[in-house]
Image (spheres, grey):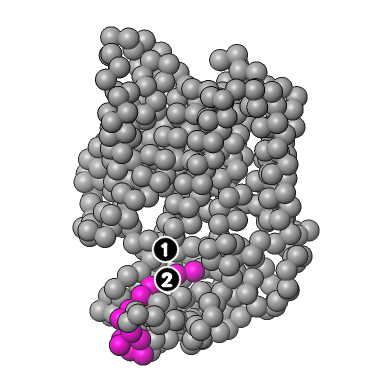
């Protein structure tokens, strides 16, 4: 049994979970809401899974959670799960599970547009092409008779778009928010908050009072249990494991697989209709997601926007008014990985913190084999100075030489905690 739990086995098992279990949850949701009202079903599912995850987090070593972290996690849980997932499940009353999954695959497209609008991170040609394909695919999908022929179907479609927008906004905000360091605790709070909101809405709307446990069939009950334990507890744990042991671009491939799994299961097990127009829409939309989420060599050096040799400008940095402390850019022709971290200090401590960071962070980065450069800048507003530290690396092996095997976590140096009032506990990585 010991060999079974080696990473060489665990990593592909975890990918299988987020590919196929998450893809199957769309049909499981449909089965469950045939017996349990949708808001009550989703709310009880997330509240139960959240309680289980909270218990597990204490078994594996819980960390202290600040009031701000509770609030942030609860807000994201409401956006991700109550509005995002809960809305999708509610819409399955009127739209087939496979079509809902396909529409949900547009979420990376929306995140791309939100990042451009909110943070000025301009898409390259591949991103623009992916956005165009996704929009054309959506037009093909919703232009069919089953989408334009009924008021309830149109209502379901509108709820899906609200859900996608909520999920996209939460995804963009997540990187900037102070969240619990323990991922299980963070997930548990989000699930408890999202589940709680859904249960309240179910009660207020009167939906919950029409429910009778005696009417739950074996299929509906087993589907609910499947969603709680495999769909939430097990698969979410696998997702977090992969964020540490794999790379974000590989984990994001679930965006391509989940809709395919959902459409096939809906067709095979639930007699859901897949028209030729739906298949064309699926190809267009999923190709658009591939363009957005994958590095395509043909597009790497092409852009519809002003070209720049600066890695900072390619990533949308720095903001107007920022003060550059260090700016050692990698060679323009060198492919690289940018490791991006944000932290905040009181404005009165800016000079002291910058001095400490230069002698520790910058010195250690540039001395690590495989480092291609460092950029360190800050901006001050309202008594707070926000610092951004970007290091450039040849590959992920070089990143691990600096940060360790758990390279998604931020690396801190002695004395930093005395200055930092807010900071990222995990680090964003971008390939360019």
**Residues rendered magenta in the picture:** 340-352
Disc assigned to residue 342 = 2
Name which residue lies at 58% across and 67% down: 120
Whole-percent x, y for residue 315 in the image: 60, 69
User: Image quarter for residue 379?
Assistant: bottom left
Looking at the rendered structure, the secondary structure element under dot 2 is strand
Name which residue lies at 35% across and 80% down: 382
Residue 265 placement, left or right of 17: right
Q: Are marks 1 and 2 in contact (CB under 8 Å)?
A: yes
Query: Count the marks: how many?
Result: 2
Give above or below for 114 relative to 227.
below
Disc assigned to residue 44 = none
Q: Which residue does the numbered mark 1 point to in the structure image?
A: 176
Residue 56 placement, left or right of 400: left
Q: Tell me if residue 85 can be seen.
A: yes
- Magenta run includes residue 230: no
Q: Residues within 10 Å of mark 2 (few under 14, many from 20)?
A: many
Q: CA distance from mark 1 to mark 2?
A: 8 Å
Q: Residues within 10 Å of mark 1 (few under 14, many from 20)?
A: few
């Amino acid at each position: 049994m010991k060999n079974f739990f080696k990473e060489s086995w665990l990593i592909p098992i975890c990918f299988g979970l987020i590919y196929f279990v998450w893809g199957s949850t769309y049909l499981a949701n449909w089965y469950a809401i045939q017996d349990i009202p949708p808001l009550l079903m989703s709310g009880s599912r997330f509240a139960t899974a959240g309680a289980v995850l909270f218990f597990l987090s204490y078994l594996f070593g819980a960390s202290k959670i600040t009031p701000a972290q509770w609030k942030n996690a609860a807000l994201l849980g409401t956006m991700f799960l109550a509005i995002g997932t809960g809305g999708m499940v509610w819409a399955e009353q009127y739209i087939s599970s496979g079509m809902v999954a396909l529409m949900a695959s547009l979420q990376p497209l929306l995140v791309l547009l939100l990042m451009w609008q909110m943070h000025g991170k301009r898409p390259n040609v591949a991103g623009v092409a992916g956005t165009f394909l996704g929009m054309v695919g959506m037009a093909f999908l919703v232009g069919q008779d089953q989408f334009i022929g009924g008021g309830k179907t149109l209502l379901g479609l509108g709820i899906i778009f609200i859900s996608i927008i909520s999920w996209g906004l939460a995804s963009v905000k997540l990187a900037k928010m102070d969240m619990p360091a323990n991922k299980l605790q963070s997930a548990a709070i989000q699930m408890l908050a999202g589940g709680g909101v859904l249960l309240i809405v179910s009660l207020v709307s009167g939906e919950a009072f029409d429910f009778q446990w005696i009417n739950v069939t074996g299929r509906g009950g087993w589907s609910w249990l499947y969603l709680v334990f495999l769909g939430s507890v097990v698969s979410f744990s696998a997702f977090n494991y992969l964020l540490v042991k794999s790379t974000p671009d590989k984990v994001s491939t679930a965006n391509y697989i989940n809709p395919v799994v959902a459409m096939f299961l809906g067709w095979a097990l639930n007699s859901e209709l897949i028209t030729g127009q739906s298949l064309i829409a699926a190809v267009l939309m999923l190709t658009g997601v591939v363009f957005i989420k994958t590095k395509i060599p043909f597009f790497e050096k092409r852009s519809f926007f002003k070209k720049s040799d600066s890695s900072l400008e390619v990533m949308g940095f720095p903001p107007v008014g920022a003060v550059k402390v260090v700016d050692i850019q990698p060679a323009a022709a060198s492919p690289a990985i940018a490791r991006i971290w944000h932290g905040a200090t009181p404005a009165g401590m800016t000079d002291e913190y910058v001095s400490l960071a230069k002698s520790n962070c910058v010195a250690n980065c540039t001395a690590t084999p495989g480092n291609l450069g460092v950029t360190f800048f800050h901006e001050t507003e309202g008594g707070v100075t926000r610092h951004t530290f970007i290091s450039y690396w040849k590959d992920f092996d070089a990143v691990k030489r600096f940060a360790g095997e758990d390279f998604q976590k931020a690396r801190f140096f002695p004395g930093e905690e005395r200055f930092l009032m807010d900071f990222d506990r995990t680090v964003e990585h971008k390939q360019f």
